[in-house]
Image (tube, helix red, strand yellow):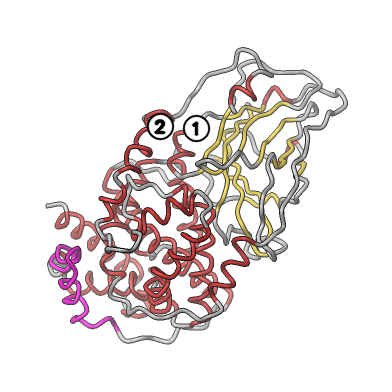
Amino acid sequence: MSAHVSFRFGPIIETTSPFPGNIATFAARLLGSRQSMDDRDGQVVPGQPDVGSLLRRCAEGDRGAFRRLYELQSPRLYGLALRLMQQPALASDAVHDAFIQVWQRSARFDPARGAAEAWLTSLVRYRAIDILRRRAREQYGLEREDEPDPSPDIVQQLGERADGEALRRCLGTLDEGQRRVVLLAFMDGLSHSELATRLQAPLGTVKSWVRRALLGLRRCLEA
Amino acid sequence: MSGIGFDRDEELVLVAGEYVLGTLPRDEAARVALEAADDPRLAGAIADWERQLLPLASLAPTADPPADLWPRIEASAYGDGSVGVLRPRRRPQGAAGVGFWRGVAAAGFLLAAGIAGIAILSRQPVTGPLPMQLATLSPIGARPAAFVIEAQPDGALSVRPVSPETVPAGRDLELWSLPAGAKAPHPLGVLPAAGLHLAAGAIPAGRVQILVSLEPKGGSPTGLPTGPVLYGGAIVRAE
């Protein structure tokens, strides 16, 4: 493509990418890691295609793979959106938008950066949070009905997942305020200002809890 | 380039963490997402948090989505609304205005975000009668470039599709500019099937990302992108 374009200009070219690496190395990483994607996901169920390979097939325009991906992942993703948004219609919108992104951008999934499940989860969460924030602005003054805090027991459930044990342990190293803001933000989609209202704490204090919680988690998770 | 101004690794990790947790106000979150498209380190920090916090997502109970959700997704994903291919148009020779436009080779950032762009830098002003192709905006992968931005001889810009682009029924594509360091993208209007013509003054000087997002019919109701950013590329107008 660049050759096609560049013939018009003659001596073009200077690449001033301000970023480390270049197309070639990035592509090599992308391609190389694609090959090991199935291993990375580590959740291959016998007889079922794993999420990573379904995403790869979606990138090739395979509608059957797209449907299979929906069948496998939508209960988990819809449940997540419902927890965040409380309203089925809103949760449906978030999952709808996320799956459209999956279809249009599955080639953008970079297995070198994370597992397929994490990518899907993030697409849904970001859509859900964006919709929540937009509604909060449109309906200024309307408070969301308070759900009870995620119970302390919920953190214990993390330990039941093989990949959740480290996070459970590290959440346990945070103090109560820090742990609450992490759970309320991630599970219930509360913004800084909503956290401040919920926890009846000044906005600056809440922001500081969030930041200290993040640093504490990072230190513990990477120890 | 960074409009957020990360000086320290810790700040990068914190902003990425706040973004993944979802505590940031909407405009700040949009800004972080766009910055991440331009900054592999930020994108990497976000991906790290997404992976590390993923187990929390499993705490939400699963729930069967409504039966009409999959048909709705299918209709949006495969719905027609195909757009034809436009051929480059010759323009009458006018004032030489293309020289100050530059495409920026920022393929690293574009690929990192999954937005592929082929960028062209020309060191010398080009003063021919033909439109000068500046940049193409395309998704990564096997799909072809989607849009091309050309500087017209009078210095105006045209954005036009170079391959059939499927826009889901009931949706529109919207064009945005994001100058380096800006806090939020600026709407340039709904991008019609036939492309869009932008006056020379529509894009500020300096390095500017041009982005295309999927929006409700008629464009974003909020003045900020509400749907996924599908395509992007960067151009620079010399001072």
The location of residue A214, given as percent across then percent down, is: 25, 60
Q: Is residue B33 left or right of residue A13?
A: left
Tag 1 secondary structure: loop
The residue at the point 39 percent across, 72 percent down is A189
| Range covered by the magenta-colored residues | A149-169
Q: On what subunit does the disc labeled 2 rest?
A: A
The location of residue B98, given as percent across then percent down, is: 72, 25
Task: Give the residue furthest to the top.
Answer: A11
Q: Nearer the viewer, residue A93 or B203?
A: A93
Is residue B183 in the magenta section? no
| Residue pointed to by mark 2 | A19
The location of residue A180, given as percent across then percent down, is: 25, 74
Q: Nearer the viewer, residue B13 or A53?
A: A53
Mark identifier at residue A22? none
Q: On what subunit does the disc labeled 1 rest?
A: B
Which quarter shows the N terminus of chain B?
A: top left
| Residue pointed to by mark 1 | B106
Q: Are marks 2 and 1 in contact (CB under 8 Å)?
A: yes
Amino acid type assigned to the residue bearing label 1 in the image? Ala
Residue A108, relative to residue B18: is it above or below? Answer: above
